Amino acid sequence: MPRPLFATIHTAALSNNLAIARRFAPKSKIWAVVKANAYGHGLERVFTGLHSADGFGLLDLEEAVKLRELGWSGPILLLEGGGRLTDIEIIDRYSLATTVHCDEQLRMLEVARLSRPVNIQLKMNSGMNRLGYAAGKYYAAWKRARACSGIGQITLMTHFSNAEGEGGIQHQLEIFEHSANSIVGARSLSNSAATLWHPHSHFDWVRPGIMLYGASPSGILGAIQGLGLKPAMTLSSKLIAVQTVEPGEGVGYGSIFRAQQRMRIGIVACGYADGYPRCAPEGTPILVDGVRTRVVGRVSMDMLTVDLSLCPSASIGSLVELWGSNIPIDDVAVVCGTVGYELMCALAQRVPVRTE
Ligand SMILES: *Cc1c(COP(=O)(O)O)cnc(C)c1O
């Protein structure tokens, strides 16, 4: 019998979430961000649900080529740009747009032999301090890019570090506006959080990622409640065994959970080798036989253990939802000290995936 664990990707949820992004930014075009294999969902699996996007943003050249092979002829943007001259050949061959965040990348486009000009997003470091030209050097970089015959359209771009939090975007927005003030050209600034919560940052293109997958940019589920976003992934399994333990008996490695009274424990076919976080503490929510209950004991490689006190009718074969529409991925993430992004990206290769 194969393991009952599988993930389901919901095409209708992806389309729904893209439509919500459009409703929030009605005047902007949308780069659907599908980096990291579409946040773990699988590029080819999300393509149908997201094909009405105006473009796709990602990092890997291989993923960009895969999108072309799936039949996408519209814009594709490399969010970090290329690092080698051979990257430029692929950028040229597959008509990719690329980010330029430093002189080395600009230089590559200046010396490359291209069959047609490459569209770029010229990135300003407005305060994130990862990638991009310093505000004071931005105008000079833009002038240099404009003088380069290998460069076509130049979109002005920056990325926010606190769009989902209290810091907000105002400070970065002011730096960007000030330094790009005299430059005419399309602008692209907003991730999901800015798309949802900072309408004055929308401009010509927005770049939502996490919201398309139905999870929260802040890692706090409450933040997206009521917006109508739907989870694009369900991780499901079944109980493969049930144990009855006596008071004082331990469960799993390290016996970190001990029963206080006689109770039933369900064994779920899902562990950290499947991408479920090993750090999930006692009390992590999980749905068993339609009932929200809790993980108890240490998550092991291929299994985890759950409290069946609230699930009297649960038995071998009972359905389990690790995350999905009943157990928001953000609820699991938050007790693990992380965000939904990390959990979905960590879904292991060995987990079979279905699309519906
Ligand atoms: C990942 C990424 C996004 C999308 O961010 P979300 O928080 O998932 O919406 C947008 N822009 C850039 C440059 C990114 O790297």
Image (cartoon, grey):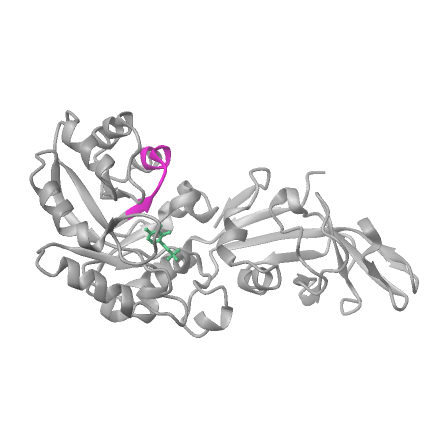
Q: Quarter-wise, where is residue 284 in the image?
A: bottom right
Looking at the image, residue 138 sits to the left or right of residue 234; the answer is left
Q: Is residue 38 above or below residue 245?
A: above
Residue 58 colored magenta? yes
Looking at the image, residue 1 sits to the left or right of residue 24; the answer is right
- Specify start and end residues of the magenta stretch as a single range: 56-65
Q: Nearer the viewer, residue 221 or 133?
A: 133
Q: Is residue 118 above or below residue 4?
A: above
The total number of labels drawn is 0
Q: Residue at x 41, y 57 (%)?
A: 210
**Quadrant including the N terminus:** top right
Q: Residue furthest front?
A: 136
Q: Nearer the viewer, residue 105 or 86?
A: 105
Q: Is residue 252 visible?
A: no
Q: Quarter-wise, where is residue 67 in the image?
A: top left
Q: Is residue 290 visible?
A: yes
Looking at the image, residue 336 sits to the left or right of residue 162; the answer is right
Q: Is residue 54 above or below residue 148?
A: below
Residue 120 colored magenta? no
Q: Position of residue 154 (x, y in %)?
A: 14, 47
Q: Position of residue 17 (x, y in %)?
A: 38, 61
Q: Residue at x 26, y 58 (%)?
A: 189
Q: Position of residue 124 (x, y in %)?
A: 24, 52
Q: Nearer the viewer, residue 158 or 343?
A: 158
Q: Position of residue 140 (x, y in %)?
A: 12, 47
